[in-house]
Amino acid sequence: MPTRLAVAVETDLPPARLFEVLTDWPRHPEWMFLTTARVVAGDGRGVGSELAAFTGVGRLGFLDTMTVTRWEPPTVVAVAHTGWLVRGVGIFRIGGGRLIWAEELSLPLGSLVRPAAKLFMRWTLRRLVRAASG
């Protein structure tokens, strides 16, 4: 059974600015804890682009591969997680003074990690807003 997660933060930043920072994949370490991201196919700016995000320290961690499935600047970007550990869909929505991050994932021990994952996601969104403010 998939684990569904969704969090939101309020922001007064323009959606275009948030979208710009969110989808600047090499900037992920600024707001996504212990994560580097890169484009592996396409230009990273549209449906079909493929991404790889490594979360961890040194060689200890995991690779999250993704394909962009929706690209609607400056309000929506969605991905299909295609890795061996993380599988499912993720979506970011920007608008109405809110930044929303939702995931529907097949995760090992999904229900056990759900509360911690939601705290982490909210903290991460706040870091994204700070990065886009700078």
Image (tube, grey):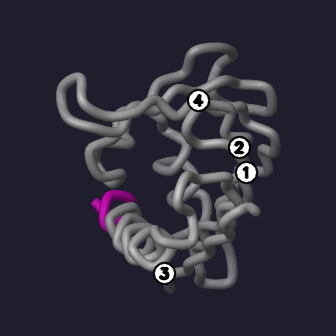
Q: Which residue is mark 3?
A: 11
Q: Please name the residue that numbered disc 1 is placed on.
A: 89
Q: Could you tell me which secondary element the residue under label 2 belongs to? A: strand
Q: Which residue is mark 4?
A: 65
**Of tags 4 and 3, which is closer to the observer?**
4
Dot 1 crowding, Cα within 10 Å, few <14, some 14–19, many 20+: many
Question: Magenta segment: does it hold 27?
Answer: no
Whether residues under marks 3 and 1 lie with C-beta atoms below 8 angstroms apart, the answer is: no
Q: Residues within 10 Å of mark 2 (few under 14, many from 20)?
A: many
Assign the magenta stretch its main secondary structure. helix
Relative side of 1 to 126, left or right: right
Sequence order check: which comes first, mark 1 or mark 2? 2
Q: Secondary structure at mark 4?
A: strand
Nearest to the observer: residue 116 or residue 37: 116
Disc 4 vs disc 2: which is toward the camera?
Answer: 4
Mark 2: amino acid: Val
- Of callouts 4 and 3, which one flags the residue occurring earlier in the amino acid sequence? 3
The type of residue carrying mark 3 is Thr
Residue range in magenta is 130-134
Q: In the rendered image, which residue does mark 2 sit on?
A: 79
Q: Secondary structure at mark 1?
A: strand
